[in-house]
Image (cartoon, grey):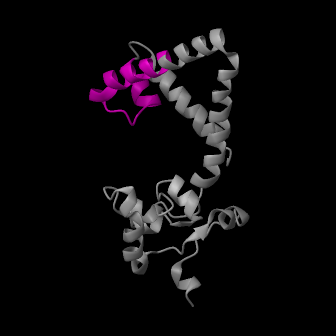
Amino acid sequence: TVSGLPVLLARVAFVLASAVPFLPAALWDRALPFVRARQRRRVAWESRLWLALHAGFVALAWSLEPRLLRVYLAFVVGHALLSVYITCEHRGLPHEGSILARTRTLEVGALLRWLLWNMPYHAAHHAYPNVPFHALPRLQRALVPRLVHAPVSVAALHWRAGESAPTPLSATSA
């Protein structure tokens, strides 16, 4: 779904599950398989700290100024809006092959590119994740001959949402 709410709920569920004291290893393996055994204690404490901070904020806001709780509504709306963008980075692309075949660059305006720290240059970011955000435009220009997919706008991707095949560069340059 484009709303991103399932992802948001999954993240909250992850924090809640990992904060449970003495969670059996079998549950970690089943519910949180991406957390290595040696990291579980740290993840559990980070989750508990995150929950305590949010509980403290809610209690403080509730007692001082309940309208401050609107920040959580803004969080849900912001997450939903960001999901419209995020779904485009890999949508309709293969799960196998080179990193440049599995991700794409998005065409967005300069302001949005700046707000997103040049993450619309997503293929460049995935191909070379250690390159800092401010160097991604230069890296993107250098990668143009190697890109598998033509840059495309978020609106165009959602417009043709039913289409499963990506747009290869060879089809756009002919």
Q: Main secondary structure of the magenta part?
A: helix
Above or below 131: residue 138: below
Q: Give the image quarter of residue 34.
A: top left
Q: Is residue 34 magenta?
A: yes
Quadrant of the image containing the C terminus: bottom right
Q: Is residue 126 visible?
A: no
Horizontal side of 66 relative to 107 (left or right) equals right
Residue sticking out furthest to the bottom: 174
Horizontal side of 113 relative to 129 (left or right) equals right
Q: Give the image quarter of residue 75.
A: top right
Task: Work out whether residue 102 or residue 152 is closer to the camera in this orientation and state it.
Answer: 152
Residue shown at 34% from the left, 56% from the top: 132
Task: Work out whether residue 63 or residue 93 is closer to the camera in this orientation and state it.
Answer: 63
Q: Is residue 81 magenta?
A: no
Q: Which residues are magenta?
A: 24-52
Residue sticking out furthest to the top: 63
Q: x%, y% of residue 22? A: 38, 13
Residue shown at 55% from the left, 28% from the top: 12
Horizontal side of 88 relative to 50 (left or right) equals right
Above or below 172: residue 138: above
Residue sticking out furthest to the left: 38
Above or below 60: residue 13: below
Residue shown at 32% from the left, 59% from the top: 131
Q: x%, y% of residue 73? A: 68, 30
Q: Give the image quarter of residue 141.
A: bottom left
Residue shown at 54% from the left, 72% from the top: 151
Q: x%, y% of residue 49? A: 42, 19
Task: Work out whether residue 144 or residue 33 is closer to the camera in this orientation and state it.
Answer: 144
